[in-house]
Amino acid sequence: MTQDHTTGPDATPETPAPWRPSRTVAVVLAGGTGTRLGLGIPKQLLKIAGKPIIEHTLAVFEAAPEIDEIIVLMADGHVPDAQRIVDKAGFRKVSKVIAGGDTRNATTRIALDAVGEGDVNILFHDAVRPLLSGRIVRECVNALWTYSAVDVAIPSADTIIQVDDDDCITDIPVRSTLRRGQTPQAFRSGTIREAYRIAAGDPDFAATDDCGVVLRYLPGTPIKVIDGSDENIKVTHPVDVHLADKLFQLAAAQAPRLTARDYTEELAGRTIVVFGGSYGIGHELTELARRHGAQVFPFSRSTTGTHVERAEDVEAALKTAFEATGRIDHVVVTAGILEKGELAEMDQETMDRVLHVNFVGPVTIARQSLPYLQQTKGQLLLYTSSSYTRGRARYALYSATKAALVNLTQALSDEWAEFGVRVNCINPERTATPMRTKAFGEEPEHTLLAAETVAQSSLDVLISELTGQVIDVRRAPGELPAAGVPAQASRASAPATAG
């Protein structure tokens, strides 16, 4: 490391030069073999939410504006697997996919050699922490302007005990001073290189934590700790797979919000088919997309006699749009029905109607849309509701079908990735639509999301590169109350439907 120089015994040390890194490199450590998971493949290749864990992780760094380059250290023998994932996903920042070492310290040395010389910011991150947030990446990089080593940690919610060889308690540290370490760990390149250079002279050196190497071999170096997150879990044990998959399911993906000009540039000449487009969210989406130059074809029971659960009706609708424009870029399914009541008291006809409209319909539409969407590398957009996370009394079938659509979204995004077709699902909070008014009556306007807001977010998703995501749509603080529900909602005796 650079030392301060003096010109004489009374000279004042020079002020260290300000840190000016040439670039910031994320090193993704993917050397695990999945032994504790009982897998035949490395755990970073296991699929969660439709994608390999390592792909989720790399996507975070790919999207982070603070990261210039990504280097992947993969388990020996599986480098080609990781390279295929990188190539398929189109990660432009990944410069190298190379084999890691037999130990953590050996892997770090390989990574430092791969980064090369010069002043560089380096972030080391476990590949099996796929729920890393962009906020953590940003704060790590920002902290390196002041500190030469940075760790990520969260407070310990549990009391930590220290035991001896006989598993008897020897100490109970004060919990307020304890943290649970996560990754990434970030360093100025000179600092981590110097720590490992000194460590090389220690015959007992064995690293499991890079900040620990700095703490032990450069004891005067402050290591800044920034806040991690409870979601930034490490997939190590079988239960972690289920937790991570559920966290992805509940995560709110973000689509970019564009300007009116950008929407027109993106949508002009595109064809959108909306099933359930007569009113509510489908109607608002139809009108909004048309204003920005898209050719939109709305279909519904009430206006075109289209029943989404009938394959022949879906086929005819898609054919109509294709023959008129020669393409179908997006297919949107807002059609749905909400029947309240105890399941044990519900008649067979009602149950069949709910299941067919809410689930068989989207499945039928998905199957028949694929050939058209393959041609345009387009997108299928489905809709769930907040009830998908927990079934609720008196509308069990509705909740069940909405949960099924989330699983359908994630499964199809995986199946259709090879065709370049994206599949996403919108999860709006309580929205002012005719379907809701029929089911629940009049509600305070300030408690409901406007259908126009959901339509806007839907459009953002359609022109994004997202796939396999459940996108939450929530009222922003200070947002105006929802607009009034259209007159079609006045027939309270009719079943609640969308489209």
Image (tube, grey):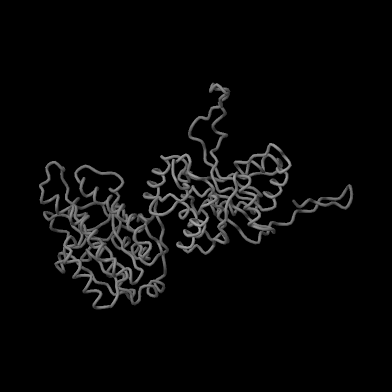
Left or right of 467 in this view: 172 = right
Q: Measuring 25% from the left and 57% from the top, which residue is drawn there? A: 432
Residue 129 makes an appearance in the image: yes
Q: Is residue 424 above or below residue 104?
A: below
Image coords of residue 17 (percent x, y): 74, 56
Image coords of residue 55 (percent x, y): 46, 55
Q: Is residue 273 above or below residue 105?
A: below
Q: Measuring 63% from the left and 57% from the top, which residue is drawn there? A: 114
Question: Which of these two is toward me, 142 or 195?
Answer: 195
Residue 63 makes an appearance in the image: no
Question: Which of these two is toward me, 287 or 270?
Answer: 270
Left or right of 164 in this view: 16 = right
Question: Which of these two is toward me, 424 or 224?
Answer: 424
Q: Is residue 162 above or below residue 434?
A: above
Image coords of residue 318 (percent x, y): 23, 70
Q: Measuring 27% from the left and 61% from the top, which residue is drawn there? A: 483
Image coords of residue 189 (percent x, y): 67, 53
Left or right of 183 in this view: 243 = left
Q: Measuring 18% from the left and 64% from the top, which residue is drawn there? A: 311
Q: Quadrant of the C terminus?
A: bottom left
